């Protein structure tokens, strides 16, 4: 369960009375959404370059600012404002690092799957470079340790015979909790996707805005990965995984 609130550590805009209104970077709540969705989705979700670059630049700037304050002889290390700024920075760095770490874990688990051209578009440039190098070295290891001793017909690592596929792929046949943030209309749901008595076939169900459902991942997958549901600034605003 997510324990980090997107607004923790930031003052209310109307609660200070100072000349300058407090500003909360709008990309910070979006980073938390991306982190949660990536953590609970069984597959890799689209990478939002703008949000990650923005937050990375803010983290670097705030870190340098805190370093300068730390070197100031008049800076009290127990000053509440200074301590809270340090805590906020660490919390944001944790979310950003964990988000990227989860994505790398998925890439290392399913390298051949994400090297396919239709899936490469989900990756950042750095992730594509990492994945190609990772699979290159892993494939070299397999060839030197085992494949070179096998007949040529048995050396392939991506054979597919009928329904048997050597390429490991994410399992999309899972259930997840999904919160509906915007109107998604009626969706085609397998009979056992909701917490109701099972029946044969599938049916159309209405998903109400603001409610959370335990649902088959395939039902809400288009709202997390398909370009037509990306919305403004590639935020995929209709569904959250929780």
Image (cartoon, rainbow, N blue to C red):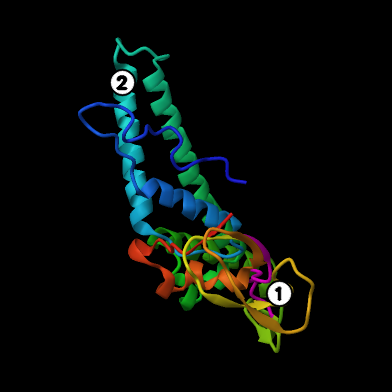
- Identify the residue at image location x=59%, y=63%: 138
Q: Quadrant of the C terminus?
A: bottom right
Q: Residues within 10 Å of mark 2 (few under 14, many from 20)?
A: some
- Identify the residue at image location x=33%, y=38%: 60
Give the left or right position of residue 41, taking residue 5 as reference. Answer: right
Is label 1 in a helix, a strand or a loop? helix
Q: Is residue 112 visible?
A: no
Is label 2 in a helix, a strand or a loop? helix
The magenta span reads: 165-177
Give the left or right position of residue 225, taking residue 151 as reference. Answer: left
Alpha-carbon span between mark 1 and mark 2: 62 Å
* Residue situated in front as seen by the camera: 212 or 231: 212
The dot on residue 149 is 1
Give the left or right position of residue 52, taking residue 109 as reference. Answer: left
Dominant secondary structure of the residues highlighted in magenta in the image? loop
* Residue situated in front as seen by the camera: 127 or 208: 208
Residue at the far top in the pictured view: 74
Q: Mark 2 highlights which residue?
A: 69
- Above or below, 3 relative to 70: below
Residue 46 in percent (x, y) is at: 45, 65
The dot on residue 116 is none
State which quadrant residue 106 falls in. Answer: bottom right
């Amino acid at each position: 369960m997510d324990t980090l609130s997107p607004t923790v550590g930031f003052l209310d805009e109307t609660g200070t009375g100072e000349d300058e209104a407090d500003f909360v970077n709008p990309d910070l709540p979006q980073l938390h959404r991306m982190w949660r969705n990536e953590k609970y989705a069984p597959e890799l979700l689209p990478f939002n370059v703008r949000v990650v670059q923005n937050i990375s630049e803010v983290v670097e700037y705030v870190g340098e600012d805190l370093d300068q304050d730390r070197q100031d002889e008049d800076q009290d290390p127990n000053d509440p404002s200074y301590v809270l700024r340090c805590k906020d920075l660490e919390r944001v760095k944790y979310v950003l690092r964990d988000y990227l770490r989860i994505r790398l874990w998925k890439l290392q688990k399913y390298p051949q799957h994400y090297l396919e051209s239709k899936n490469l578009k989900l990756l950042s440039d750095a992730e594509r470079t990492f994945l190609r190098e990772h699979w290159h070295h892993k494939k070299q290891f397999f060839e030197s340790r085992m494949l070179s001793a096998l007949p040529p017909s048995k050396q392939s690592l991506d054979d597919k015979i009928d329904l048997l596929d050597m390429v490991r792929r994410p399992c999309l046949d899972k259930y997840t909790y999904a919160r509906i943030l915007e109107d998604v209309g009626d969706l085609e749901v397998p009979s056992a996707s909701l917490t109701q008595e099972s029946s044969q076939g599938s049916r159309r169900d209405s998903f109400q805005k603001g409610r959370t459902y335990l649902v088959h991942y395939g039902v809400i997958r288009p709202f997390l990965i398909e370009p037509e549901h990306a919305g403004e600034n590639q935020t995929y605003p209709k569904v959250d995984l929780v």
